[in-house]
Every structure is written in C-alpha cells, then in structure tokens.
Image (cartoon, grey):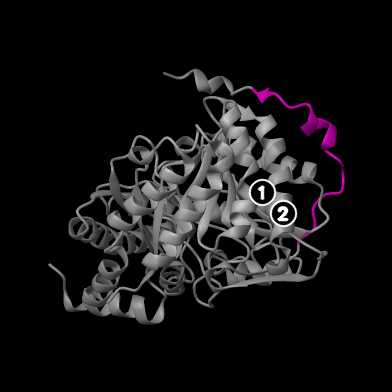
Amino acid sequence: MFSKFDVIETIDMIEKEHLDIRTVTMGISLLSCIRATAKGTAQAVYDLVMKKAEKLVPTAEALSGEYGIPIVNKRISVTPVSLITAAFPQKSMLVGQALDRAAQALGIDFLGGYSALVHKGTADYEAAFLDTVPETLAATERLCSSVNVGSSKSGINMDAVRTMGEIVLKTAQLTKERDGLGCAKLVVFCNAVEDNPFMAGAFHGVGEGDTVINVGVSGPGVVQHALKFVPEADLTDAAEVIKRTAFKITRAGQLIAREAAKRLSARFGIVDLSLAPTPARGDSVAHILEELGLEVVGCHGTTAALAMLNDAVKKGGVMASSRVGGLSGAFIPVSEDIGMIESASAGKISIDKLEAMTCVCSVGLDMIAIPGDTPASTIAAIIADEAAIGMVNNKTTAVRVIPAPGKTVGEEVSFGGLLGRAPVMPVHTGDAGAFIRRGGLIPAPIHSFKN
C-alpha cells in the first residue's frame, strides 16, 4: 500500500528533483525483412518498423499523462543492420535511410542499430558495411550507430579499432558544419549488451524476441537531493540512502515498462538502472559526487566516490525490478552533465581522470570533444585503452568522442537538447600510430577460459 507520504514524495521527485523515465525503447527484430535486393529489404524494414512502433509515441505519452511521470524519449532499437545487409553491404545506406524516415514519421527521438559486431574478426561484408557509416550518419538525423570491437571472451580486434579511429574522424569531417554532430551518434563498444535502451549504443540483439520494451530510468537530481538530508553521514550510511532512493526510482521504471509492454503487445525486456544526467542544473551525476564531499568532480577521490555510487544504485535498483539489464549504473557523459561541463571548462577534469572513472561505472569515455586535428591513430588508441578496461574487467566500456572540426583546446561545441555542449579537451600528443598499425587481435585475458 502507498501512504500519503509516498505520494507526496513521488510528486516532489518529479516536480523538483528531475525524476523521469529517460527512455522507453522498443526493440524490433529485422531478421524477417531480408530480401534479395537492397531496395526490397529497405522497404520491408520501413514497413515493419512502421507497423510495430505505430503506437509507441502515443502510448508513452498516454502513460506519462496517466501516471504523471515524464517520459523524455521514445526510441527504437533494431537488429544490427550489418547482418540484414550482408548480401549487399555497399548499399546498407538504403536501409539506414529507411530507418531514419520511419523514425521521423513515427516521432521517434533516436533509432539505434546501424551496427556491426566485429569483436573477434571483421568479415568482408562487415568491412564494407563499416565504410558506409560516416556517409550514412551524415545523411540521416535520428539514426545511431555502434560497433563492438572487443569482448572479455574474444579479446580486442585491433584491425577494427584502427578502422574505427578513421571512421570517427571521417564522420566528424562530414558533419563539420554541425560541430561534428555525426560522432555524437556513433559509439565504439567492448562487451556490448543486447538490451541497452540508451543511445547511441542501443541495438536489438539476435537473442531477443520479435518485439521488446526496454526502459531506462533516471534521477540524478533525486539522489543528490536525498543526500542533502544526511550531510554528516559516513559513507556506509550515504550508500544506504542511495540504495533506498534507487529502489524508488526503479519501481517507477518497472511500472511504466510493464504497462507499456502490455499496451504495445510486446515482451517486457529490462529496466536499465543507469543514472542518466542532462545539461539541466539539478540533474547531474557530477553534482552527486560533489554532494558526497568532493570540492569538484575530477579531484582525487572522484573514482572512489563514483564506485560507491554505482554499486549502491545497482544494489537498490536490482531489488525493485524483476528484470534488470542494459548498462545499469551511472553515466558520465561530459557534454550531457552540467557538473562535468563546468569541471571540464575549468580544467579540473581530464580525459585521463575520466578514463580512470570508467573502470568503476557504466560505459566509458562519453560525449567528449577533442581537437579536430587529432590523428585517427590517436582516436584508435583511445578506443583501444577503453576496450582494454572493459575486456580485463569483464564490463561494458565504450568511446564516444567528437573530434571538433576546426576547433582547438578551450573552444566549445554545442549540440543542444540532451546532447548539450562541451569544451574541447586536450589529448596526449605522443604518437601511438606504430602500435595501432600492428593490427591483429589482442588476446582475451586468462579469465576468458571460465565455463
């Protein structure tokens, strides 16, 4: 039973503390859409997505109105397109454009799945598909792309890492009039998961059902507000406060996820527990860490505080939902978190510190602007470093960096909305080109032999 206090508390979370459902994401299998030609496949893909997701936006809006919980994004994820276009990979853009048209027609915010899984090796059709990524992202508005280049079981495909360094740079150049916006829709993974509802990395795994609803909750502001009431608590008690708060946030996500799946005749997939920040003040993961006692995010102690936060969120959330999945933890995207933006602008946090933080939180180096003249080999080396963290620690890591065309350290890129803005951050100038050009496969660590 809900008490009067519970109702009032939930209303306060929504109205004053930025509680929301960050995304309701419908996963759709495209395997039944494969036809003999690219044009036929593209049409089948468009028709299926339009049919399956026809009521997604109206349903989400209705649920938001009925329960009084804002649902910020309505999204779609699909089977990795490289699998759908394996017979004609050079024409994959036709399918990408069909997906983008469907997203626009349905009022979808983002559609993920222009993706390839090359963590152990790159087949010829996958190599051809990857060549289409920059042009496709430049030619579409809502389509997102992801590429998995490593895993704890297979190692790191360094040939694919080298290729992705070049692709990121080319994508930035093709969208230079928009500060390299295409790179904000492109993420490189190690240990990618098949049920992630967040963009740009969402895709619908081949082990999933035909149609699935995955929900991503949020609530950094709620957690920060809860900590304000225990300013003198030790870290054990602070962790308990975070756990209880994460439980309440996740219950809201579970409610919306189950009801959305029921109304859309889809399977309920998972609730992703990740604390997802926005550029709005009062909705920042960085400010949670500062509430715990850090003068500024990025100072010594930041990694420890983030580890505690991430663990407490998972412990609290996992008890509140029957199915937890996705990435689940705390995101630290620079451009999408006002506290991160301010710290980076003041020179208080570096890419090196962000890399250390990724060892203990969700995903990795996210929405970081770097100088536009950064070599492709340096971008590839950044990807390799982050993939190594994911491979060795058996966790999902990713890189979403934006080489800002024509801009240098201290200048700023701006994308607006949830993508926010970011200062251009420095990268190391030492050349890793010879290392990247070696190629091959970095072998999986010894623990990959577990069965």
In the rendered structure, are the residues bearing label 2 and label 1 in contact, judged by CB atoms less than 8 Å apart? Answer: yes
In the picture, the disc for residue 355 is 1
Position of residue 63 in the picture relative to residue 50 (left or right): left
Q: Residue at x 41, y 47 (%)?
A: 78
Q: Position of residue 435 (x, y in %)?
A: 80, 31
Task: Give the quadrant of residue 367.
Answer: bottom right
94 is within the stretch colored magenta: no
- Give the prevailing secondary structure in the magenta stretch: loop
Residue 86, above or below 366: above
Disc 2 crowd rating (10 Å Cα; few below 14, some 14-19, many 20+) is some
Residue nearest the viewer, comparing 365 with 235: 365
Q: What amino acid is labelled 1 in the image?
A: Glu
Task: Give the quadrant of residue 30.
Answer: top left
Query: Which quarter of the rendering shows the C terminus?
Result: top left
Position of residue 62 in the picture relative to residue 302 (left or right): left
Q: What range is drawn magenta here?
A: 425-442
Q: What amino acid is labelled 2 in the image?
A: Ile
| Farthest residue, direction left | 1
Query: Which quarter of the rendering shows the N terminus?
Result: bottom left
| Farthest residue, direction right | 430
Name the residue carrying label 2.
Answer: 351
Position of residue 440 in the picture relative to residue 208 (left or right): right
In the picture, the disc for residue 172 is none
Report if residue 204 is visible in the image: yes
